[in-house]
Image: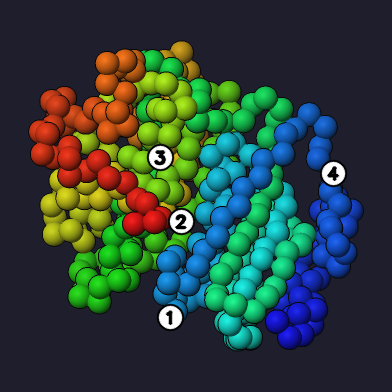
Amino acid sequence: MSGEFNLIDKYFAARQPNRSDVQIALGDDCALLTVPQGYQLAVSTDTVVLGTHFLHDADPSDVAYKALMSNISDLAAMGATPAWLSMAISMPELDEAWLESFCDSMFALADAHHLQLIGGDTTKGPLTITFTIQGFVPYGQALTRSGAKVGDWIYVSGTLGDSHAGLDAILDEHNLIKPFAQTLINRHFRAESRVDFAQSLLGVASSCIDISDGLISDIKHILKASCVNAKVHLDKLPISSELIAFYDGIETRAHHVALCSGEEYELCFTVPQKNKAIFEALQTRSNTQAHCIGQIIARDEANESSTHLIKFLRNDAIISNEEEASIQQGFDHFN
């Protein structure tokens, strides 16, 4: 991109003060950083692409927020504290108004999480943004996908399905007249941060994952990594009144959307029975509410098919085979 260094100086440099653990940031071949003693470094990378994750007329401030929050959510899922950020951006041509709005939103969200931009790259090409985010977690205490045990309780934070409904409104203009369409669009682009909430789970939860590909797909990652199965109660899924209204008041439809909706950036985690009272006490002091939706059960060694890792119930009764078949598919970036 012509004038790359002027672009960096104008939009990215000198926007933030140096953190004490940053010795060199923008302006050299590499950043130089110090990891605090007693902590491990957590690193995540996510890419958003025009036409796949957002449309050409999307507000650049929303694009920036969504792109960065997807990375922040990965750190939250492991109980990590955000610290450093790198970004690579390609643009077909320089659009200063678009870039200014994007940067203002990006830096506002970064500053809210004490994240410092320490490097990256700019180039000419299809509009694509890649963030690499790094954070700290106390040594040996990170939340992972592999710690769930039989008897653990399964929780999800917030409500589920709103992001999918917002996307339905974005992709089909006929849905814009439905109740709460704009509210749900806003929730699609502006997920709430769960960083503080996740850190309260350290030493309490046994496993955790963020919901980026849909609850069904993501909970299966926990089940496979932990070599267990699960039972999930559909009637206990947390869904918003706005979601139900958007889908014509049909709660079963809202529940199905809640199961498969991608890009929610809520947390799905498990809590051992011995820690359940501790967790519920934490809930009384938290701004983030979580809901118990099921329990970890033993792996059925006779049937290890990934489509049978989860037993779905409604009102304590197993759902029909037909309904189960209709809700087994989660979000897939390549479909």
- What residue is at 28 percent from the left and 65 percent from the top? 168
Image coordinates of residue 55 in percent, x first then y, are 42, 74
The local secondary structure at tag 2 comes to loop
Q: CA distance from mark 3 to mark 2?
A: 17 Å
Which of the two discs, 3 and 1, labels the residue nearer the N terminus? 1
Q: Where 258 falls versus 206 (above or below)?
A: below
Q: Are marks 1 and 2 in contact (CB under 8 Å)?
A: no
Which of the two discs, 1 and 2, labels the residue nearer the N terminus? 1
Mark 3 neighbour class, 10 Å CA radius: few under 14, some 14 to 19, many 20 or more: many
Q: Nearer the viewer, mark 3 or mark 2?
A: 3
The answer to whether residue 285 of the structure is visible from this angle is yes
The local secondary structure at tag 3 comes to helix
The amino acid beneath tag 3 is Asp
Which of the two discs, 3 and 2, labels the residue nearer the N terminus? 2
The residue under label 2 is 191
Residue 57: image tag: 1
Q: CA distance from mark 1 to mark 4?
A: 40 Å
Image coordinates of residue 230 in percent, x first then y, are 32, 25
The residue under label 3 is 218
Q: Quadrant of the C terminus?
A: bottom left
The residue under label 4 is 34
Q: Are marks 2 and 4 in contact (CB under 8 Å)?
A: no
Which of the two discs, 3 and 4, labels the residue nearer the N terminus? 4
Mark 1 neighbour class, 10 Å CA radius: few under 14, some 14 to 19, many 20 or more: few
Q: CA distance from mark 2 to mark 4?
A: 30 Å
